[in-house]
Amino acid sequence: MKLDHNIPYKIYLGEDEIPRQWYNVRADMKNKPAPLLDPATGKPLTAEQLEPIFCKELVQQELDDETPYIDIPEEIQDFYKMYRPSPLVRAYCLEKKLDTPARIYYKFEGNNTSGSHKLNSAIAQAYYAKKQGLAGVTTETGAGQWGTALSMACAYLGLDCRVFMVKVSYEQKPFRREVMRTYGASVTPSPSMHTEVGRKICEAFPGTTGSLGCAISEAVEEATTHKGYRYVLGSVLNQVLLHQTVIGLETKTALDKYDIQPDMIIGCAGGGSNLGGLISPFVGEMLRGEKDYQIVAVEPASCPSFTRGKFAYDFCDTGHVCPLAKMYTLGSGFIPSANHAGGLRFHGMSSILSQLYHDGLMQARAVEQTSVFKAATEFARVEGILPAPESGHAIKVAMDEAIRCRETGEEKTIVFGLTGTGYFDMVAYQQFNDGEMSDHIPTDEELQKGFDGLPQVPGQD
Ligand SMILES: *Cc1c(COP(=O)(O)O)cnc(C)c1O
């Protein structure tokens, strides 16, 4: 391995280089992402309509398509200092292993107890809830990363945190559940008898192990029926992408500092928050006509929203209590195959990323989970970090590209987002290690069932 001694192995910025403002890429978009619609009327939702569900300032951020930079409150900046700036690491060992002329960098967001980038938005959302004088927040969690991040943020601010955790995960991932409880959150397996919608679902589907869509419906009901509570969400929304731009802004500062020009930027895409956060400052340059980059979203072949979805208005949840968002979607009734273990299971995609993809500013690739775990395992063995399966999607495409560069001799600079660690995903790694993991690619007929459930929206094709 040959180090470039002009550039640090890991580029750590100083605390004073943590961004003081988030960057709102919508301000530079000519084609703005479509507004959230009220499912009852088909009209754009107003701030007044959103405020009973979400915190006031977060509603402002959600609806603001014009302000390019939004100040990060000092208390959030201070919290960021507990675990930021996150390092931008040169993947020397991976380059050597792949024998590639490509230069590979990754931005590592797993260096905090929640183990992922989700803390960047959790602290912001909890902060605004606190500032509004609320007693607490409610949310859903699937595998548990978002619930964990939110419980940490709420513990820091002294807010109550009520998490509805998909029942099957609650039972199969007791460690995640106990991390959340250790941080003081209450964790309820969903569907539960605790909410009206939960009781209905339990009655209609006795013995059901739950779904994310169902947990969202319960969390929203919990917030709207309790005084002093609001609902918060860990991905998909514009506000979440905004908070996650700390990732991209730090990455850009680090690259600029050492005069490194990335050619390709890669990230995994579930609801789009880490990818949106990573690419926003770079896409901003593209939108302003200053620079050009190849930007790639990576998604599971078993949940292919970008590559096989439709760009249409859809519900964000299975219970249809949430607003309609225009996005690349597989339909709110779509449920990925039960053997899918690699995360990124959401049926839709951030409206911002959907619009950028639609306008040709980014590409997308779908990859199969066995190839993802293979790449994640190779990465762990040479780079030391045990990646989250979600992050493995980005690793897979970065490695494919590096191998392609070996064949063409291209000295491409590749940057990818390493969103988190996989210590709580060892059951999935075990399946892979035992050779028991399989791939499922939905057929066109299976996808059509999801598309058949797309809502009719007046004035939309
Ligand atoms: C939640 C999560 C993701 C996917 O969510 P996005 O909103 O698409 O970023 C990716 N990686 C990790 C580690 C996660 O916890």
Image: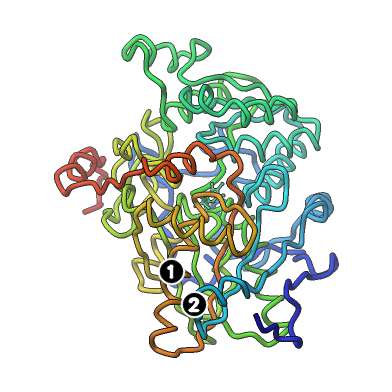
Query: Amino acid under label 2?
Result: Met
Q: Residue at x 25, y 49 (%)?
A: 441
Residue 39 lies, in percent from the top left, at: 35, 37
Q: Secondary structure at mark 2?
A: strand
Colour scheme employed for the rendering of this structure: rainbow
User: Of the residues shown, which amino acid type is indicated by label 1?
Assistant: Val
Whether pointer 1 and pointer 2 mark residues with C-beta atoms closer than 8 Å, the reply is yes
Rendered image quadrant of residue 181 = top right
Residues 73 and 109: in front is 109
Q: Position of residue 72 (x, y in %)?
A: 75, 57
Please tell me whether residue 80 is drawn above or below residue 181 in the rendered image: below
Q: Which mark is residue 132?
A: none
Residue at 31 percent of width and 38 percent of height: 337
Q: Place residue 43 in its image quadrant.
A: top left
Name the residue carrying label 2.
264
Q: Which mark is residue 296?
A: 1
Q: Quadrant of the N terminus?
A: bottom right
